[in-house]
Image: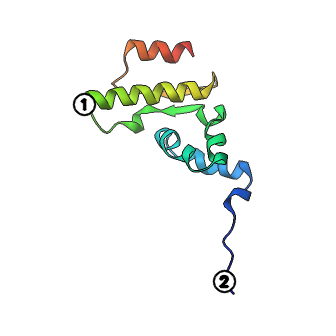
Amino acid sequence: MAKKSPNWLLMPDELMENILQRLNSVEKIRSAGKVCRTWRRICKDPAMWKVVDINKWRDGSDTNYKLEIEMLTKQAVDLSCGELIDFSIGGFCTDDLLDYIVLR
């Protein structure tokens, strides 16, 4: 008799949150929220966005990359819904982006 695979969606939300917290912010924005409705709901929870580290996202220097990072930064700040408590940013920050972060 074949062994039945576990239904991962029956896992408690707290355990899924713990797993998803281990992803970096880009992975949560770009990928994890697209896996299923449950992961999308968890990734939209402001508690997942209390800490955002932009330094981990750095892997390019062209203009398109900088625009993408700015867009992802704004998206992460918006997802925090005012609960952002720790934000680390690399050398690409502009005054406009810093104003955006502070105002939210």
Relative to 95, 81 lies left or right: right
Which of pointers 1 and 2 lies earlier in the amino acid sequence? 2
Q: Where is mark 2, residue-wise?
A: 2
Left or right, residue 9 beside residue 60: right
Check the picture and name the quadrant holding the C terminus.
top right
Q: Residue at x 59, y 44 (%)?
A: 21
On screen, residue 25 above or below 7: above
Would you call the spot at circle 1 few (<14 residues within 10 Å), some (14-19), or many (20 or more)?
few
Q: Farthest residue toward the left? A: 62
Badge 2: residue crowd in 10 Å (few <14, some 14–19, many ≥20): few
Residue picked out by circle 1: 62
The image shows residue 29, relative to residue 69, as above or below, that is below
Q: Secondary structure at mark 2?
A: loop
Looking at the picture, how far across and down is residue 94, in whole percent?
A: 37, 16
Q: Quadrant of residue 93?
A: top left
Residue 44 coordinates in the image, percent (x, y) = 62, 35
Q: Residue at x 39, y 37 (%)?
A: 57
Query: Is 88 located above or below residue 7 in the figure?
Result: above
Rounded to the nearest whole Å, what is the CA distance between mark 1 and mark 2? 52 Å
Residue 47, disc:
none
Disc 1 secondary structure class: loop
Question: Going by the image, does 100 lie left or right of 62?
Answer: right
Q: Nearer the viewer, residue 85 or 78?
A: 78
Foreground tag (1 vs 2): 2
The image shows residue 2 at horizontal and vertical percentages of 66, 83
**In which image quadrant can residue 4 be found?**
bottom right
